[in-house]
Image: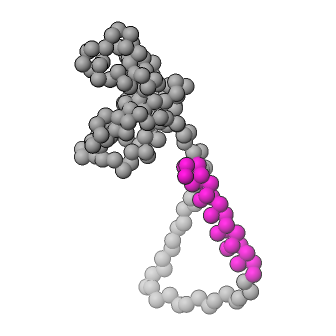
Amino acid sequence: MALGGIVKFGVIVIAIIALGAVIAAANRPATPEPTPLPSYSPRAVRATVEPTASVEPTPPAKEISYTVLKRGSLETGAGGIVIPVEYLNDADMAALGEELKQDYASDRTVNVRVFTDNRAYALYDKVIAEQATPQEDALYTKNFVGWYKKNGSNGYHEFDTFIGGVLGEHKTLTY
């Protein structure tokens, strides 16, 4: 169930409980106020109740869809996903990072590269071995747009984003 659905479900449950309490209070017969018990404390204690601030509900995070080419973990090695190019902005890449964080929460070690073209993912080995043609290298460089990494052993957990490709603007989101 998506986060927005969970929030809506929680609000509905709270509303039902509150409505039940109001109905129960309305149907309860009036009872006289109980007689206060004497205080056995040598000094009176006064409690001050501070008003609580009202909290606005947080809007649900945007869901970012992606295609898994290979799930990246310690067992499977580096993975790869493909996202639509319209997600190449700071807000959507941050939302993608949060989504990856949730999707890989149970994995101890994660290594996932993010691309906007599945052909670029297939070129990884050639590019690293410096055997890619100039056209293949350009395709890879332009479409490699993020790298999500997590190491549960030492707490390392980051998502590097490359708006405009791996040679473009770099930002690191740390979790």
Q: Residue at x 41, y 15 (%)?
A: 139
Find out whether residue 85 is within the magenta segment. no
Give the x, y percent position of residue 45: 48, 76
Residue 166 falls in image quadrant: top left
Mark yes or no: residue 109 visible: yes
Question: Which of the two residues, 158 or 75, is positioned nearer the viewer here?
Answer: 75
Taking 132 as reference, is 71 above or below it?
A: below
Find out whether residue 18 is within the magenta segment. yes
- What type of secondary structure mainly makes up the magenta span? helix
Q: Residue at x 34, y 38 (%)?
A: 72
Mark yes or no: residue 161 visible: no
Question: Which of the two residues, 42 or 63, is positioned nearer the viewer here?
Answer: 63
Residue 114 falls in image quadrant: top left
In the picture as drawn, the residue positioned furthest to the top comes out as 134
Please identify the quadrant where the C terminus is shown: top left
- Residue range corresponding to the magenta coloring: 1-27
Classify residue 16 as left or right of residue 27: left
Classify residue 94 as left or right of residue 70: right
Residue 27 falls in image quadrant: bottom right
Question: Which of the two residues, 109 or 34, is positioned nearer the viewer here?
Answer: 109
Taking 146 as reference, is 9 above or below it?
A: below
Classify residue 118 as left or right of residue 127: right
Classify residue 44 as left or right of residue 106: right
Q: Residue at x 64, y 69 (%)?
A: 17
Give the x, y percent position of residue 84: 52, 27
Question: Which of the two residues, 80 or 7, is positioned nearer the viewer here?
Answer: 80
Q: Residue at x 39, y 45 (%)?
A: 104
Taking 34 as reference, is 129 above or below it?
A: above
Q: How many marks?
A: 0
Give the x, y percent position of residue 125: 29, 23
